[in-house]
Image: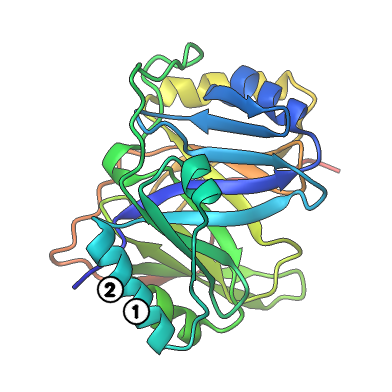
Amino acid sequence: MNTVMRLGYLGFEVSDVDAWEAFGVDLVGWQGERQTPSLLTARTDTQARRLFFHQGSRDDLIFAGWEVADEAVLRDIGRQLTEAGFAVTEGSLAEVQERGVEALVRFTDRAGNPLELFCAPMIASAPCSTPLQSQGFVAGSKGLGHYVAGHPDLAAARALYCDILGMRISDYILIPTPDGGSVRAMFLHCNTRHHSVALVDASLPHKIDHFCLQMQAFQDLGLAHDRFVASRYAIRNSLGQHPNDLGVSFYAATPSRISVEISWSDFELEEAGWTTRTFDRTSLWGHHPPAK
């Protein structure tokens, strides 16, 4: 079966590119590169472009790129998407060049989340420079990290993300809501990372709630936390540990309306014998909102 292999990149339209440049380099610790005055890209590993920040007013996700093995797989999945009723369009030459890939196609899921499929990303000629970290980010074959988006119809989401794109369900979490109820979140993997995307059975205020970058070293997570505490960006959820991937993380504000999760985990998902479970909490401990 032809499947997506990893989350390759995320693209955002942001109102303050300069703020994102300082935020990423001085706080998170990725390597930024200004392509034009209105376009910032960032590296977290050998792939030349993992994050894109376009000048604009939306302050939200504008594309999520999923890597496939080659152009033959790209065309096959594109055909399946078209047959399933998705409007698939070819990436323009400008888009292909900007992303630094060989080919790409674009479409949206049933909830309107903007997705891309691509192959053959450009590999940088020089090592990634992450001087704020001792060991850098967990990326490579596991992809960029993960993001959380809304999708009010998880059955329709499963038909796309699992049946066509080939992802597998890791588990579910019932997220408590202020009214005493809960919403269901579905966590999906496509490699040994516990999840590369989570879809929440709800409509979110923005395309995504947050995106996550994972540190190689636990100490680097702590040092990043200290940098954020000393910065002007609020900690939105304190250090805590999730029940499904056992990752330790914190959530912080960004220059836009979305959050960033900085995490550490030594979890490796083994497909053989994996059992999908449902959890009734988002955290084993911590992840508390700021005190009022």
User: What residue is at 38 percent from the left and 29 percent from the top?
Assistant: 45
Residue 142 location (% of width, % of height): 31, 45
- Numbered mark located on residue 76 in the image: 2
Can residue 237 be seen from the camera position used here? no
Instruction: Quadrant for the C terminus, please.
Output: top right
Residue 134 location (% of width, % of height): 40, 14
* Distance from the alpha carbon under mark 2 to that under mark 1: 5 Å
Q: Which residue is mark 1?
A: 79
- In the depicted structure, whether residue 29 falls above or below residue 211: above
Crowding near the residue tagged with mark 2, few <14, some 14–19, many ≥20 C-alpha atoms within 10 Å: some
Instruction: Quadrant for the N terminus, please.
Output: bottom left
- In the depicted structure, whether residue 49 falls above or below residue 276: above
Residue 41 location (% of width, % of height): 57, 32
- Numbered mark located on residue 226 in the image: none
User: Residue extending furthest right?
Assistant: 292
Q: Are marks 2 and 1 in contact (CB under 8 Å)?
A: yes
User: Residue extending furthest left?
Assistant: 272
User: What residue is at 30 percent from the left and 57 percent from the top?
Assistant: 68
Q: Is residue 55 left or right of residue 189?
A: right
Q: Nearer the viewer, residue 129 or 124?
A: 124
Residue type beneath disc 1 = Arg
Q: Is residue 85 left or right of residue 46?
A: right
Residue type beneath disc 2 = Asp
Quadrant of the rendered structure where residue 70 is?
bottom left
